[in-house]
Image (cartoon, rainbow, N blue to C red):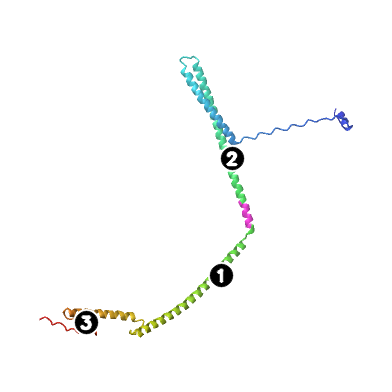
Amino acid sequence: VFFIYSERVHMGGKQSAELPTPKAAAPKAAAPTLQDSTARLDTQIANLETKIEKSNNDAKKWMAQASTNPSAKARAMQCLKMKKQYEQHRDQLMNTQFNLENMAFQQEQAEVIATAVAAMAAGRDQMKAQQQTLNVESVEKITDDLHDLQAEMQDIQTALAGSALAGAAGDDAELEAEFAKMQEEAELERVMSGGSVLPASSTAAACGAAGHSKMQEEAALEKLMSGGSALPASSTAAPVALPATAAPVAPAPMAA
């Protein structure tokens, strides 16, 4: 048959064989994730809880009818048996769910560790790339340049501060000279106005002594006017000079 078909094709026959096209393979369903499996187990466990509660309620109902219905006890026993099966199935599903959750937790930990390792590898590559652009000699040269610049700036600041202090010392000398000149002018004005000539350094001491002597004179005069006793020792040692304008006052007679 194959030979005849080949002859017809080579001889230009009108008949042509149509080869069957292979059917496309159906796409495979994606494998369920651990989270999907856990959610599905949650739904099944909730359904079993509902069935367990229903079986328990049915058993109680049939037990209440046991005194009047002969088959009530058998039905109640059957309900309790179904309840026990549901409970066993629920416990199995809960154990399976625990294992899935534990596996999901381990998977998350593995992802975290993989992320950390990838970050560490990237950091290592960056450090290597940066280290290639720097070396110990270049860093030492930079630090030496910084030290030189700091020393130069300190020298400049010292020079500026020294020049400023020198200018201040010259200003102080000029100010002292100007102050002495002003003192001389003030003394000259005092002499011209009729005052006594005193050195600038003894002016304050002289004023203090004159004030003290005047106070002594006034105290002695008040005692004489009131007819008191003899003058104190301090006043008898040195005679008291009365003012020129005041008339001399005779001492009062002593009592017998």
Q: Nearest the camera: 239 or 3?
A: 239
Q: Which three-letter amino acid code belongs to the residue tagged 2?
A: Gln
Q: Element under label 1?
A: helix
Image height check: is 238 above or below 46?
A: below
Tell me which corner region of the image, top left, top right, bottom left or bottom right, holds residue 133: bottom right
> Residue visible at 62% across and 50% down?
122
Q: Residues within 10 Å of mark 2 (few under 14, many from 20)?
A: few
Q: Give left or right: position of 88 versus 172.
A: right
Q: Which three-letter amino acid code belongs to the residue tagged 1?
A: Glu
* Residue, disc 1: 152
* Residue, disc 3: 235
- The part of the chain drawn in magenta is 123-131
Image height check: is 171 above or below 41?
A: below
Q: Where is residue 232 drawn, in percent x and y?
A: 19, 80
Q: Quadrant of the N terminus?
A: top right
Q: Estimate the spatial distance between the alpha carbons at disc 1 and disc 2, rounded to whole Å.
A: 62 Å
Q: Estimate the spatial distance between the alpha carbons at disc 3 and disc 2, rounded to whole Å.
A: 117 Å
